[in-house]
Amino acid sequence: MLLLKLFFAFIQVGLFSVGGGYAAIPLIQEQIVNIYGLMTLEEFSDLITVAEMTPGPISINSATFVGMRIAGIPGVLICTIGCIIPSFCICLILAHFYYKYRTVSGVQVVLGAMRPAVVALIASAGASILMLGLFQAEIQDVVLGNIRVVELGIFAAALFILRKFKVSAIAIILGSGVTGTVIYALMGAI
């Protein structure tokens, strides 16, 4: 029964995560944390952090890590396949129609109209990740007094270095991990 729940949860994620992998994160959270209660928000946040750092699409990585955490290897297979199947089928169908009708002006108008919605979905996912990192809460549950100062400092420094010096994202991730580990070790939290 658990595997069936996971499969249907990730079929929905695969169907409705329009805009790429980051748009899937709020959908996975809704299914796994809020609807089925299969993990806590903190566990989910940790898994998303690991999924973000590993190579490959974030939605597939997230599905894989969630499946492993909840149901082991069968969970990995069920969640990953559930996440991939809708996208695979939709992409095949859309690719066929796009190549057949790409010169029609109406197709270009529709694609142009969809761009702002896709940007909004990606921005929403980014805001969700930021709130999880800085407050360990969803956007609607944020209390400014609960801000995690160490994470805010690391975020601000990473953003500054990334924008000012154009440093590699890998170096930013590794540097942030080392910095956070050192700070928490010095604070005695590790």
Image (cartoon, grey):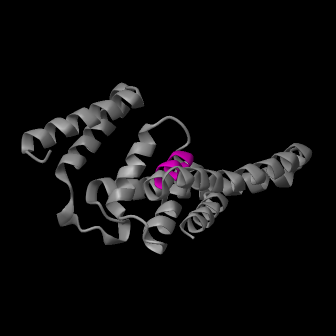
- At a point 45% along the width and 59% down the height, the residue shown is 70
Image quarter where the N terminus lies is: bottom right
Look at the image and say whether residue 109 sits in the magenta stretch.
no
Image: 93 above or below 185: below
> At 21% from the left edge and 35% from the top edge, which residue is drawn?
179
Q: Which of the two residues, 78 or 160, is positioned nearer the viewer here?
A: 78
Q: Where is residue 83 shown, x and y percent of the image?
A: 62, 54
Q: In the figure, is residue 92 to the left or right of 7?
A: right
The residue positioned 82% from the left and 46% from the top of the image is 95
Pick the front one: 1 or 185: 1
Percent x, y of residue 10? 59, 60
Report the front residue among 34 and 140. Answer: 34
By secondary structure, the bulk of the magenta-drawn segment is best described as helix
Q: Is residue 83 visible?
A: yes
Residue 162 is left or right of residue 63, and the answer is left
Classify residue 120 by image quadrant. Answer: bottom right
Region of the chain picked out in magenta, as a range: 59-66
Q: Determine the residue located farthest toward the right in the rendered image.
A: 100
**Residue 65 magenta:** yes
Q: Is residue 19 visible?
A: no
Residue 27 in picture, x, y percent from top left: 53, 63
User: Would you say 35 lies left or right of 4 here?
Assistant: left
For the residue pair 15 and 95, the one nearer the viewer reads as 15
Q: Quadrant of residue 178?
A: top left
x, y percent for residue 69: 43, 54
From what the image shows, is residue 1 above or below residue 111?
below
Image quarter (top left, top right, bottom left or bottom right) of the C terminus: top left
